[in-house]
Image (tube, grey):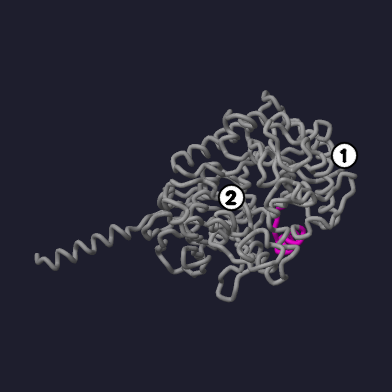
Amino acid sequence: MNLRFCLLIVSFTLIAIVRSQTTLTIDPSKSYQVIEGFGASDCWTVNYVGKFWKQEEKEKAAKWLFSSSFDKNGNPKGIGLSIWRFNIGGGTVEQGDSSHISDLTRRAECFINSEGQYNWTKQAGQQWFLEKAKSYGCKSFVAFSNTPPVFLTRNGYGHGLKDGNANLKTEKYAAYASFLVDVANYFDKKKNIKFDYISPVNEPQWNWDGTYQEGSPWQNYEIKKIVVELDRKLIEKKCNSSILISEAGTWEKLSKPAGRASNQIFNFFDAKGESEMLKINNLNRIIAGHSYWTDTDNKRLKQIRDSVWLKAKQYNVKVHQTEWSLLSVPPIDDFPKSYEEATYTDIALQMAKIIYADLAYANASTWSFWTSMDVEMNGFKNRFNLIRLQTKNNQTKTIEGGGKVLAMKNLWVLGNYSLFVRPGYKRINISGADNLSGLMGISFISPNGKKIVTVLTNNSTKPIDVELELPKSIKSNIFNIKSYLTDKNSNLKYTDITKTKSLNLPFKSVSTIIYELK
């Protein structure tokens, strides 16, 4: 055997190793949670964009967020969010600089004043996007509050106190609950927009005593108290919304004792727990948490979510993931050494890993990003936005002067889920793709059984060839297979792969594969 022939054999062997094919098996007979939707919130800049920016830029942002349409080449025009989170402000805009919140975009208007008079022209920019979401077909709306109206708070401001107790006067719980229900009823009756959930507290574990944004701490017993009052007002005022709690600042606070406002699944949903909240009419068996601060270590990332699901399953509680953006500080597994070295795609792939983990391990029924749009400052890149707001000097203080909107890589990566995994789809089993540092695969089936959607994330630094194996009864009914690719070069790029036997997944990419059945 000559040297040239030996080298040729070695070369082909190396290629085979690098591009070896992985077979993934999808089994619809094993199913898990029903998906309620994917979303984002309108904090904090949406009110300014909707109120002050040119129509062309507003329309472009709305299309990217909410459109489920496709162009003539089959490529999506938007990501079809099915959940939109509307912030009910506390009135720090009206306080201006005396609010102690230095960034004007982190202040929010309030629909009510200290005399109890409502002004429904407030939050006009947010209302514009809320109505756009509905017009595009967004299915679910959540009204959430970071702070009670400032005139109801203990310190007269929209930020919290260092004592860790709710920034709400003890005699004003009913007034705060009444305000939240009045807002929900206004939009239901006057705008024909029903809020499925009212969320009265947000990240109660933190003091929010700084000057960054609106916020309030809460103790578990205080959360129970506001939920009781909110339930009474929902019944009294004949409001059709349900109550969502507790929007925990991190997953650990839901499943174990860990300081203030913790072990919340047990405390809120165990009949023997301190809260006994099972008796509340309008509180569904749902616990909401945020995915912040849990993604530096892959092993810990999985363990935390496994723990949440174990406790939620024990108490027959559904899990909602209602906020995530990239707050963790490197070192982060499978991520560049610093944010300076990270690309926009690196950040989007970190989000893809979190979505996979929240759905596959925590069995989350919803997943939402924080926040839909923001100005890119301080080298943050796309850590905190789906849409970048390009303002004068890239500052939030110039946001009232308008600017340009730019679709970021996060938007399109989230679209691999939000556009194709619609409310009512059920997660089904897929084996062979559960490597957080490599190939992650997660599958869903439509309510009528006519579509199977699989999202494949290649988090590795090499391309991967995969073949999806389906039961014979399903394979015989396939008439069309579509693929949508998002990587550094593509944004949900459409390809018809009906006649393709195996798929090539580029490195650092997310692909959605859709089987359409007869």
Magenta run includes residue 131:
yes
Q: Position of residue 504 (x, y in %)?
A: 40, 63
- The residue at which mark 1 appears reads as 236
> Does the image show residue 84?
no
Question: Mark 2 or mark 1, which has the lower sequence index?
Answer: 1
Q: Quadrant of residue 129?
A: bottom right
Q: Main secondary structure of the magenta part?
A: helix
Q: Position of residue 418 (x, y in %)?
A: 60, 57
Q: Residue at x 69, y 24 (%)?
A: 274
- The amino acid beneath tag 2 is Lys
Q: Position of residue 502 (x, y in %)?
A: 40, 63
173 with respect to 387 (left or right): right
Q: Quadrant of the N terminus?
A: bottom left
180 with respect to 308 (left or right): right
The disc placed on residue 426 is 2
Q: Which residues are magenta?
A: 127-141
Asked if 127 appears above or below 287 in the picture, the reply is below
Q: Quadrant of the C terminus?
A: bottom right
> Does the image show residue 456?
yes
- The amino acid beneath tag 1 is Glu
Mark 1 surroundings within 10 Å by alpha-carbon count, few (fewer than 14), some (14 through 19), many (20 or more): few
Report helix, strand or loop for mark 1.
helix
Q: Residue at x 84, y 38 (%)?
A: 175
Q: Report the residue that reaches farthest toward the bottom.
A: 72
